[in-house]
Amino acid sequence: MSPYDALLIVSFGGPEKHEDVIPFLENVLRGRNVPRERMLEVAEHYYHFDGRSPINDQNRALMAVLERRLDVPIYWGNRNWHPMLADTVRKMREDGVERALAFVTSAFGSYSGCRQYIEDIERARAAVENAPPIAKIRPFSTHPRFLEAMADRVRAALRELPHGRIVFTAHSVPVAMAQLSPYVEELRKASSAVATAVGATEWDFAWQSRSGPPTQPWLEPDITDYLRQSRRDTVIVPIGFLSDHMEVIYDLDVEARGVANALGIRITRARTVETHPAMIEMIAELLEKQPEPCARGCCAALIRPGVK
């Protein structure tokens, strides 16, 4: 029997229409020293898709599949857009939830992908009187079912481009932030496991979706620079993401594909794990366990000069 009487899906959030885009991005960038010009540049990515991010529909799809598999109620709250996390925690309290487990849509340990979500959950609980306890599942990049789901996605992509060079990708972060977390190590271990599962003896890793100022060193190479340097047919595997949201469909399917077309090389992209049956079984298994605590001081925030 599960020690929890509810599952809470916690995600990043995304706009659902054109007029949501700027308020959403202002939420994302609050407290960060990002030029407004960069925010407007990112806004164009969303306008390219009529202002609607796919991430919310992907979370609804995940909930629908989980509801058929689990026997506990499922809730959903976001960091940056509706449904906001505090509102969801309030609804959980009103429904009489006594102890919930949180599944965060991020598999790897980093500040923005793990510890910040812990802070988000505690902030939401603090805003709701008598909020139920909520335990967060630890990053699960080594879980066999996650790796199984990712390997299946890669096999499908290789059927489209059998001789393509596999390159795994994930969201770039500042080098200084990466040094405070197991992010890079976990990504490379998971990529190696997936490559082995599909029989690939050689593979590469690149980064994507950088958003910081050019004066700050971030993890490199960017996937577009990788393609320009390699100039070979490529199977791109966005292992750092759990669903085909905006940073996947724009940064890879639009920008990276545009570079590949200009170079005259072929690329294909593996799907993210999304609602793969192995992922659903993984979540069901984790609902039966008490999460292990994160190491003290793991994934600390990067202190940015001039930002409070």
Image (spheres, helix red, strand yellow):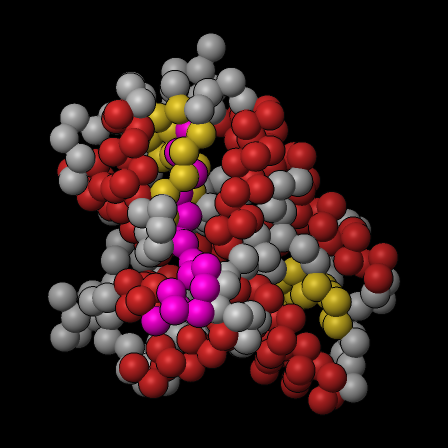
Q: Position of residue 192 (x, y in %)?
A: 64, 52
Identify the residue at horizontal 16%, vertical 26% (top origin): 130
Question: Residue 293 vs residue 304: left or right?
Answer: right
Q: Which residues are magenta?
A: 7-22
Camera-nearest residue between 299 and 122? 122
Q: Is residue 305 left or right of residue 292?
A: left
- Residue extending farthest to the top is 1
Which residue occupies the foreground of this view, 112 or 250? 250
Q: Position of residue 297 (x, y in %)?
A: 25, 47
Q: Quadrant of residue 95?
A: top left
Return the x and y of residue 210 as percentages of the image width and height.
Answer: 44, 73
Was residue 16 drawn as part of the magenta stretch in this picture?
Answer: yes
Residue 167 in view of the camera:
yes
Whether residue 58 is in magenta: the answer is: no
In the displayed structure, would residue 108 be above or below residue 266? above
Q: Quadrant of the C terminus?
A: bottom left
266 lies left or right of 172: right
How many marks can you see? 0
Q: Position of residue 79 (x, y in %)?
A: 33, 51
Q: Residue at x 80, y 68 (%)?
A: 164
